[in-house]
């Protein structure tokens, strides 16, 4: 599977048709998805119909956009009109939206080909993509390992070369961590840059939509399409939408990169790869210095209290009356709601609803939720201070290599600590970009670039320069073993 611009050129030059490309893509997905668990729903009939329409335009000599005919996958918590959106939960197993999310409307205007809805952690709750009611997702580099969560299906399908790009959502690292575990590029944009309208909410003040791609340039192309003001979304920011791909690869000589020391704790091999990446930047003229984020150690507990509190509120709507499935043969409404939520929610979702409800309860609000909000403010001040001196910050994405299947749930606290380097970024709303920076034991390792609010263009440029001077992004897993 080629990159976006290369695939576009091949289609325009009639080296192959969109229909041929889509048929090849569907054959790949049908072969590898059952082993990897990447898809919940495959939209074969629609994909072939849409491909034929674009082929007709090309035959007539009509211009097509750079994304027209490009195969893509979409995380199954993003609403797609006429295509079921399950959130990987039995609660929404048969839910088919009657509208498109704003990101889908924007993409549909450019006519990429939707291959299917990607598997994920149930309601985006998890760090490994193992909590899906439709089965766990596996890492294409090693099926004994997880792809990361919660957008694991969207990451794995790009890494496995099933599609050219995909969409995911990032609440505490759910794009950046799977991108790192699968050896691809993933971005969490500044909060408010990409509309959340039509995305099933997990934690509304933290959720963001963005893409998985093989290269930074592809990431920039997708960002240009999906970002921008949306009057339907109250937290959408009304500001000009820049050309993210224009001028990628400019010199970074003199770029000031801060290295937050608090995030360099974990697997020694992972830390060595990140430090080697810093040497690459230094050799290209960047200025590297340590910096402190003093309240970083409090970010993770604050994140899990705030995220769980918002989840407990957002998921209250799935009660058998307003949304979702409903049990039968119960005596009254109270039993119906209780039985419905008990039967159709999975274990991880129930756990986070209980934590969030407890944190918001009258007797504990001040002790937990209010304190977590104060930590969020202090953390924001830490990052603001760091960005007074530095252009970008560089950290690991995760403190470890991908977990083996089942490992994280034997020690859930250790698994939650895996979000140490990513969750604080959602709390302060700044952008983060993951790019591959090495391998260990045959598994990918990613680095994370962080920037000031709305500095996506600078991050993408810094990522593109790293790509131009390394070859980690050119390596792919061996799919012949599946």
Image (cartoon, grey):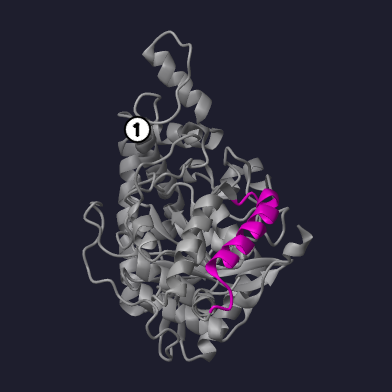
Q: Position of residue 355 (x, y in %)?
A: 44, 35
**Residue at 49% in and 36% down:** 349
The residue stretch that appears in magenta: 14-38
From the image, give the main secondary structure of the stretch colored magenta: helix
Q: How many tags in the picture?
A: 1
Q: Position of residue 426 (x, y in %)?
A: 39, 57
Q: Position of residue 163 (x, y in %)?
A: 57, 63
Residue 175 sits above or below residue 68 on the image: above
Q: Is 236 positioned to the left or the right of 246 in the image? A: left
Judging depth in this view, the residue of 108 and 188 nearest the camera is 108
Residue 208 visible in the shown view:
yes
Q: In the rendered image, which quarter contains the N terminus? A: bottom right
Judging depth in this view, the residue of 31 and 339 nearest the camera is 31
Residue 184 sits above or below residue 89 on the image: below
* Magenta-drawn stretch contains 33: yes
Residue 408 sits above or below residue 331 on the image: below
Which residue in the protein does label 1 denote? 364
Q: Is 301 positioned to the left or the right of 383 in the image? A: right
**Residue at 50% in and 35% down:** 93
Judging depth in this view, the residue of 225 and 331 nearest the camera is 225
């Amino acid at each position: 599977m080629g990159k976006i611009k290369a695939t576009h050129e091949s289609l325009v030059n009639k080296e192959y048709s969109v229909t041929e490309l889509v048929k090849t893509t569907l054959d790949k997905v049908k072969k590898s998805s059952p082993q990897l668990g990447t898809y919940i729903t495959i939209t074969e009939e629609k994909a072939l119909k849409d491909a034929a329409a674009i082929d007709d335009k090309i035959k007539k000599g009509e211009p097509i956009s750079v994304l027209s005919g490009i195969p893509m996958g979409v995380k199954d918590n993003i609403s797609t009109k006429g295509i079921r959106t399950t959130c990987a939960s039995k609660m929404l197993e048969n839910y088919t939206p009657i509208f498109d999310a704003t990101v889908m409307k924007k993409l549909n205007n450019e006519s990429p080909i939707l291959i299917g809805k990607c598997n994920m952690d149930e309601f985006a709750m998890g760090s490994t993509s193992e909590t899906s009611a439709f089965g766990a997702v596996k890492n294409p580099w090693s099926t004994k390992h997880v792809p990361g969560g919660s957008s694991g299906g969207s990451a794995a399908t790009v890494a496995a070369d099933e599609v050219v790009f995909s969409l995911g959502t990032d609440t505490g690292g759910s794009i950046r961590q799977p991108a790192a575990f699968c050896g691809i590029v993933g971005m969490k944009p500044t909060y408010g840059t990409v509309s959340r309208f039509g995305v099933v909410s997990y934690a509304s003040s933290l959720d963001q939509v963005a893409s998985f791609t093989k290269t930074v340039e592809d990431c920039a192309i997708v960002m240009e399409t999906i970002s921008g003001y949306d009057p339907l979304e109250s937290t959408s920011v009304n500001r000009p939408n820049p050309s993210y791909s224009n001028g990628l690869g400019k010199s970074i000589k003199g770029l000031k990169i801060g290295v937050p020391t608090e995030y360099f704790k974990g697997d020694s091999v992972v830390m060595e790869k990140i430090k080697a990446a810093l040497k690459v930047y230094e050799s290209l003229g960047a200025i590297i210095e340590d910096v402190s984020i003093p309240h970083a150690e409090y970010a993770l507990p604050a994140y899990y209290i705030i995220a769980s509190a918002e989840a407990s509120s957002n998921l209250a709507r799935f009660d058998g009356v307003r949304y979702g499935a409903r049990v039968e043969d119960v005596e009254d409404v109270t039993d119906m709601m209780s039985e419905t939520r008990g039967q159709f929610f999975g274990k991880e979702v129930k756990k986070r609803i209980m934590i969030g409800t407890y944190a918001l309860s009258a007797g504990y609000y001040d002790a937990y939720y209010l304190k977590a909000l104060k930590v969020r403010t202090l953390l924001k001040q830490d990052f603001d201070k760091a960005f007074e001196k530095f252009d970008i910050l560089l950290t690991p994405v995760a403190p470890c290599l991908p977990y083996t299947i089942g490992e994280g749930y034997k020690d859930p606290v250790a698994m939650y600590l895996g979000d140490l380097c990513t969750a604080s970024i959602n709390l302060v709303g700044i952008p983060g970009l993951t790019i591959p920076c090495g391998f260990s034991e045959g598994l990918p390792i990613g680095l994370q670039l962080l920037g000031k609010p709305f500095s996506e263009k600078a991050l993408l440029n810094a990522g593109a320069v790293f790509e131009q001077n390394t070859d980690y992004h050119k390596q792919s897993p061996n799919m012949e073993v599946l």
